[in-house]
Image (cartoon, rainbow, N blue to C red):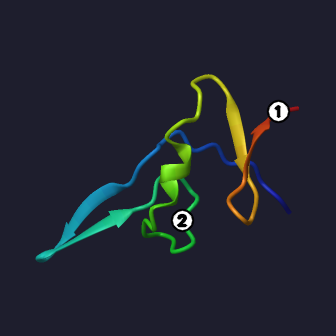
């Protein structure tokens, strides 16, 4: 079953594990979940108040909720 999940974050959160710094994905686009792979860079020019969807190739289109 498919689900619509709305992510509002446009960047990762940094956490420290011992002496290592890791970045956890918050945009939902990373192919390396739960870690950031830089995919959030695609979200930086999204307009406030609009919804977007991304396909499996990372291509963005505007979304409408029913």
Q: CA distance from mark 1 to mark 2?
A: 23 Å
Is residue 17 shown above or below 30?
Answer: below
Closest to the observer: 36 or 66?
A: 36
The quadrant where residue 17 appears: bottom left
Residue situated furthest left in the rendering: 19
* Quadrant housing the C terminus: top right
User: In the rendered image, which quarter is residue 30 located in?
Assistant: bottom right
Which residue is disc 1 drawn over? 64
Q: Is residue 46 above or below residue 14?
A: above
Q: Position of residue 3 (x, y in %)?
A: 77, 54
User: SS of the residue at dot 2?
Assistant: loop
Image quarter in which the N terminus is found = bottom right
- Residue 60 coordinates in the image, percent (x, y): 71, 48
At label 1, counting other C-alpha atoms closer than 10 Å, the crowd grade (few under 14, some 14-19, many 20 or more) is few
Q: Is residue 64 left or right of residue 19?
A: right
Q: Residue at the location (49% across, 40% down)?
A: 44
Q: Nearer the viewer, residue 47 or 65?
A: 47
Determine whether, in the image, residue 52 is placed left or right of residue 16: right
Nearest to N terminus: mark 1 or mark 2: 2
The residue identified by callout 2 is: 30
Residue drawn at (53%, 39%) of the image:
8
Mark 2, Cα crowd under 10 Å, few <14 / some 14-19 / many 20+, is: some
Residue at 63% x, 22% y: name it: 49
């Amino acid at each position: 079953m498919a689900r619509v999940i709305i992510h509002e974050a446009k960047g990762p959160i940094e956490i420290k594990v011992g002496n290592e710094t890791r970045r956890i994905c918050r945009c939902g686009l990373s192919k390396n979940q739960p870690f950031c792979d830089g995919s959030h860079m695609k979200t930086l020019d999204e307009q406030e108040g609009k919804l977007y969807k991304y396909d499996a190739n990372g291509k963005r289109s505007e979304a409408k909720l029913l």
